[in-house]
Image: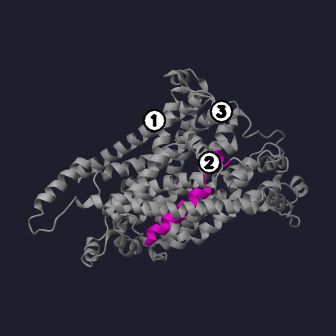
Amino acid sequence: MAVETIKAPVASRPDARHRTGKARWFVLAAAVLVGLLILAPILIMVLNAFKSPSDYSQNGPLSWPHGLYFDGLKAFWERVNFPQKLWNSIFISGVVAIFGTLLSLLNAYAIGIGKIKGRLWVVTLFLLATMLPQEALIYPLFTMAQNVGLGNSPWSVIIIFTVIQSAFGTYLLASVLATFPKALLEAAALDGAGRWTVLWKVVFPIVRPTLSVLMIFFFIWTWNEFFIPLVMLTTNDTQTIPIALASLQGDRMMDAPTTNAGALISLVPALIFFLLFQRTLTRGVTAGSVK
Amino acid sequence: MTTQTLGKDAAAKQQAATPRPKRKAPHWVAYLPYLLPGLAAFVLVIGIPLVTNIMYSFQKWKGGMAPHTWVGLDNYQALLHDDAFWTSFRNSISMIVAMVIVPTIIGLLLASVLFDYLGKRFGSRTASVLRATYYLPQILPVAVAGVLWNWILNAQTGAVNEILRSLGVDNPPNWLGSPDTAMPSVMLVLVWVQIGYPVVIFMSALQRVDPELYEAAELDGAGWGRRFRAITLPQIKPETFVVVLTCTVAALKVFGPIYVLTRGGPEGSTLVPSYYSYLNFFDKSKVGYGAAIATVLTLVIVLVAVVILVVQARSERKEAEGH
């Protein structure tokens, strides 16, 4: 169950034995076709994001745009006040990523290295929590937030997601730390290092790669979250990008180019993030599933 | 826990006379402070709300300042006779087909073609580019994917119907707007969103399998299909369980795509439990009823998860005995 960094396989070259045969080209064509089918909606979106409404209604969704049209993008940008939504999303996701990882590390330090009593129960509890439907928590959370003056505040969402994400993070990290080399801990103890020092001077540097995977995960997951922000962030100025986009649905100004430009610009941050951390991520997706 | 600590303390005091280094408490107690913030936050954000929600489910409450009335099991009794409630759980089965069964089967096939066939014939670079393509829908925020598909499938201005009309179809279907086509359309979108996840997991699982197994089978003249059944499937069982478990839980919880695509309509044809409970909470102001739906959903999810975990444990035990 460890998040051992799976070594990226050395890029293999096709070996001679397998090179023969024409069937392989058919299989490749089929696999590429599947890829194109999956890409099709995204390609259509890009194609129609910069097309004027009249161009769209005349030439349909598959034609090449006659000239670049930026009014859809502009309309969406101004209507939702995109920079503000972008900042809301970055702020919430960023703080959750940091706090969530920190909390996971503290929990996992007690469970994986401290081997506290009843740790199996704690881990099971956290694991079960990751399965709970958010509907079973939302109304009390909503009421609690209102009562403590955090209604419609990004901090209510930050606190909730810090805990939800760290439940998963603890589960994952605890199993990683359970296999932490004992010799290192003993050596540090002999040098007179306390638990706090051991955590930051010995454990932290070694699990840093796993922590960064967790952090990227928490960021993207929180960024993509829909239900809790939808309920908790009730006014325009506090909303995150996905909520702002969804709340414009059915709006009159949302013609085809505006919808596409809005969807496109809303997925750009996630896409940039994905491309930047692609290798770390594909490593991370498999984390926890592989022994 | 406290009594135990106290007992050890007393023991330590007795030992104090001897020159041995005194140990106040078991080793792990010193680590408790590290768990405290996490545990406190957990109780506050998950424990208390979960229990409170269950209490709401025994009440009649319109939310806000309205009075709470205890009604016992009335909400649950009403659920039994509520068609919408049963429909929502029946629709959950469609969600499981679209988010678990279809993606797992197709994903397994794609992963094994990419890894075992294309990877060997065209190099692993080709395989990983294709894998990244399949994974792309997974990184889109679900709301973005929903808005995009909502436009593509829109009856008047949507891309699909524009294309159909240009091909001479006079009356293209209202994909998301008619009860017959809404559910299949939603399922298609969910398959599209979901497919990359099993592909990535299964491909990494296949990298774990000893290549010598395949080579030996190949030398014995086993074709690709034989190798798939005799080697691939049994070897990646652990990952298959993980995929099935996580996707089933996700399918039972699905909310975002429904909210953005259909809002449960038309005529409840795409209603799911999570959306139904949301509707009761924030639209109909029937908090107690919404809480009861959410509680039932929680129980169903926990039950399904436990069943999958038990089946997995049993299958692992069987394998261990087989060796």
Q: State how the image is colored.
A: one colour
Q: Nearer the viewer, mark 1 or mark 2?
A: 2
Distance between mark 1 and mark 2 Cα atoms = 32 Å
Rendered view: B266 above or below A210 = above
Rendered view: A234 above or below B126 = above
- The amino acid on which the numbered mark 1 sits, given as a three-letter code, is Leu
Chain letter for mark 1: B
Task: Please name the residue shown 79% across and 60% down the image.
Answer: A77
Q: What stretch is highlighted in magenta?
A: A208-233
Where does the image place residue A234, in percent across and percent down from the top left? 69, 46
Q: Nearer the viewer, residue B152 or A152?
A: A152
Distance between mark 3 and mark 2 Cα atoms = 39 Å
- Residue A289, visible in the rendered structure: no
Q: Is mark 2 on a helix, strand or loop?
A: loop
Chain letter for mark 3: B
| Label 3 packing within 10 angstroms: few (<14), some (14-19), many (20+) | many
Judged left or right of residue A82, residue A5 is left
Q: Is the magenta stretch mostly helix, strand or loop?
A: helix
Rendered view: A208 above or below A94 = below
Answer whether residue B292 is magenta in the image.
no
Distance between mark 3 and mark 1 Cα atoms = 23 Å
Where does the image place residue A1, in percent across and percent down from the top left? 36, 59
**Residue under numbered circle 2:** A149
Q: Which of B233 and B306 is in front in this view?
A: B306
Mark identifier at residue B299: 1
Q: What element carries label 3?
A: loop
Q: What element carries label 1?
A: helix
- The amino acid on which the numbered mark 2 sits, given as a three-letter code, is Gly
